[in-house]
Image (tube, rainbow, N blue to C red):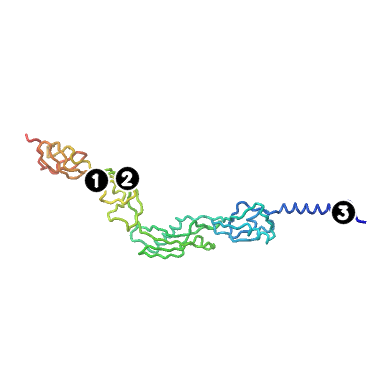
């Protein structure tokens, strides 16, 4: 006689099976892998534990090679699902993602540090005769955004250098962390011989006197430098501009003169000194002059033209004690 489903033994079997299925479901929910929202690794390889939470015993399994330090790469969700299942990790992509971005941490290397190392290497191979001259690099190509792996102490070293002194062209191989497996970078360009020269930081009008805060020194290529370019900042302080001068341009000796303290056409005082005698007259300047210049003036009373030395603003003295001073024709 068939047993009724209500019979006690059959109910026990059904109940036991339900308990097992519930337990299995609970267990499955506990170990369900969850894709991490931000995936960044520091090492050379990517493991399942880097990609998923709840990776359990498969967490240490290596599945990809990581991108270069400081870089990132994309993996399709379909590929990741296949790889995960091949290692016993069942990810159902409930998030509905299509691609996964994986980044690798890195320590950025300042490009100026690389340039400085190359400049030092070029100076060592081809030293310059003038101590104030140096090399300035014009880099034409190099790896952008250079990084080394975290946990590595960067040590920048030029391991190979090719330099043509005549053309200035160079190619350098630079190790960023020798002995750590970090690949070197290659930098190419031209090394230009430069020296510091004086430039203005603001425009100067004709006749304006130069102050110390108006000037600075900047490096300029020797090939573009005029023979009379001013290299000593102190040499122009206190001088006046002969013409309007713009900032950011090398200054030349011919651009300056001593400040004029007597202008042409100005009425000034002429003094004449002789033993026991001092005479002063009024005169008109026929020439402009700076302190110490010898200029021609015309006596306003006698109309006689004489040479005088500028000693102060609108004040001159006769050039010799024998210079005749005719005060009046009456």
Q: Residue furthest top?
A: 330
**Secondary structure beneath disc 1?**
loop
Q: Residue drawn 26% across and 49% down?
A: 255
Q: Which residue is mark 2?
A: 203
Residue 38: give x, y in percent of width and height.
60, 52
Residue 111: give x, y in percent of width and height.
46, 56
Q: Which residue is mark 3?
A: 10
Q: CA distance from mark 3 to mark 2?
A: 104 Å
265 is higher (above) or lower (below) than 113: above
Q: Residue drawn 82% across and 54% down?
A: 17
What label sits on residue 258 in the rendered view?
A: 1
Q: CA distance from mark 1 to mark 2?
A: 18 Å
Give 144 or 236, whichever is nearer the viewer: 144
What label sits on residue 224 in the rendered view?
A: none
Q: Tell me if 158 is positioned left or right of 219 in this view.
A: right
Give 39 or 15, whichever is nearer the viewer: 15
> Do labels 3 and 2 touch, CB within 8 Å?
no
């Amino acid at each position: 006689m068939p047993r009724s489903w209500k019979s006690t033994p059959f109910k026990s079997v059904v109940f036991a099976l339900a308990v097992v299925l519930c337990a299995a479901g609970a267990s499955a929910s506990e170990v369900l892998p969850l894709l991490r929202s931000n995936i960044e690794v520091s090492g050379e390889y990517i493991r399942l534990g880097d990609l998923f939470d709840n990776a359990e015993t498969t967490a240490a399994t290596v599945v990809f090679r990581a991108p270069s330090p400081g870089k990132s790469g994309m993996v399709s969700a379909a590929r990741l699902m296949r790889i995960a299942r091949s290692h016993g990790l069942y990810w159902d992509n409930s998030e509905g993602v299509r691609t996964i971005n994986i980044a690798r941490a890195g320590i950025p290397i300042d490009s100026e540090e690389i340039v400085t190392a190359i400049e030092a290497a070029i100076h060592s191979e081809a030293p310059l005769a003038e101590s104030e001259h140096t090399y300035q690099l014009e880099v034409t190509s190099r790896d952008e955004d250079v990084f080394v792996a975290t946990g590595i102490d960067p040590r920048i070293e030029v391991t190979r250098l090719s330099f043509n002194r005549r053309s200035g062209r160079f190619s350098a191989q630079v190790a960023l962390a020798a002995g750590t497996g970090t690949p070197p970078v290659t930098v190419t360009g031209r090394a230009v011989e430069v020296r510091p020269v004086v430039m203005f930081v603001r425009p100067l009008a004709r006749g304006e006197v130069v102050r110390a805060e108006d000037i600075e020194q900047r490096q300029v290529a020797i090939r573009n430098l005029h023979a009379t370019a001013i290299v000593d900042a102190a040499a122009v302080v206190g001088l006046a501009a002969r013409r309007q001068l713009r900032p950011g341009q090398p200054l030349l000796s011919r651009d300056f003169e001593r400040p004029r303290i007597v202008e042409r056409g100005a009425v000034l005082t002429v003094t004449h000194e002789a033993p026991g005698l001092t005479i002063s007259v009024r005169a008109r300047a026929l020439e402009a002059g700076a302190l110490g210049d010898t200029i021609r003036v015309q006596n306003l009373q006698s109309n006689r033209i004489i040479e005088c030395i500028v000693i102060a603003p609108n004040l001159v003295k006769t050039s010799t004690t024998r210079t005749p001073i005719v005060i009046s024709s009456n």
